[in-house]
Image (tube, helix red, strand yellow):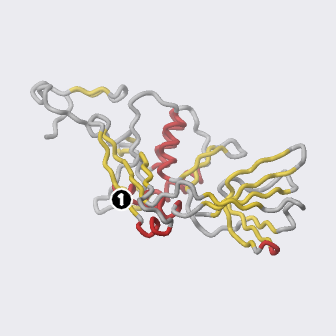
Amino acid sequence: IEIDFATRDEANGEFTVAEENWDGAQELSVDVIGKASGGVALENPADIITDILASVGETDLDTAAFQTAHDWFDLGSDHRGARIIHMRPSLYLKESAEALDAIREVLAVTGASLYVNAGGQWVLRVSVPSPSDAVDLTEHEVLENSPITRDEDTTDIPTEVKINFAKREQEDYSQTLTETSEPLRILRGLSAHNTRTVEAALWKEADARYLSQKILSSEGSPLVKYEMHLPRLALVIAPGDSVRVRRDRASTDEFLEVLEMNFDLASKQCTLVLGDMR
């Protein structure tokens, strides 16, 4: 049964209901759609992050980057004209929290990253696999007597993913979706599934299913890492960028992702840790 509030204090999140509508004994729950902007709930992750940043006085944004991210999450409109949002967050803050902690929850489920560029502006970028002009590193770039080392991480490879989403704090209840990959279990030689449980700040089942399938497809194989040392301190790349590594003597020709960059000012060297783009 749906009932109206008797009073509303949206600034403090306090609402009351009339005695004739609720006797105090029946269970009562409230579905909160979210903060509104122009009469429409904020559902696009880019808009939510923009709003959280603005709430702490951070308004110097790379507007082009934020608009690109906004457009990626916006899939269009349905037959009623409502926007269809990909990876719509379900972010519930029942007590005071740091702004960046709230933003991290949104980033964790959307696959986006937020950082400050050289000009001091906040940049929001969605991690989308796509062809790109990668920095090309050949064997001549790598320091002599410093071979490219290769390491394969086979720990914690999931063959089953359980997503808890759309949590109802009042009832302490979450919807649950489980995706299983039998071929992965057999390939890894496991007698039982290696289950990974994820608490996802998502609202829709379709987004939870997308996240579970993404984890199985991207993390269902070992992570291969490469480490190399370069005789330079300046590189026009950043973590998350693509790098093509070619080395004839080691029969290496791969497109990799920059995972870490460490600079040694004394020796004027840069250490790169690269990973296969799984």
Residue 79 appears at what percent x and percent y?
29, 63
Please name the residue shown 11% across and 26% down the image.
Answer: 23
- Residue identified by numbered label 1: 206
Front residue of 25/191: it is: 191
Please name the residue shown 84% across and 62% down the image.
Answer: 142
Residue 59 appears at what percent x and percent y?
58, 38
Front residue of 55/199: it is: 199
Mark 1: few/some/many CA within 10 Å (<14, 14-19, 20+) = some
How many numbered markers are drawn? 1
Front residue of 278/170: it is: 278
Please name the residue shown 51% across and 41% down the image.
Answer: 103
Q: Secondary structure at mark 1?
A: helix
In this view, the residue farthest toward the front is 191
Quadrant (top left, top right, bottom left, bottom right) of the N terminus: top left
Quadrant (top left, top right, bottom left, bottom right) of the C terminus: bottom right
> Which amino acid type is marked by label 1?
Ala
- Give the vertical position of 166 relative to 9 (above or below): below
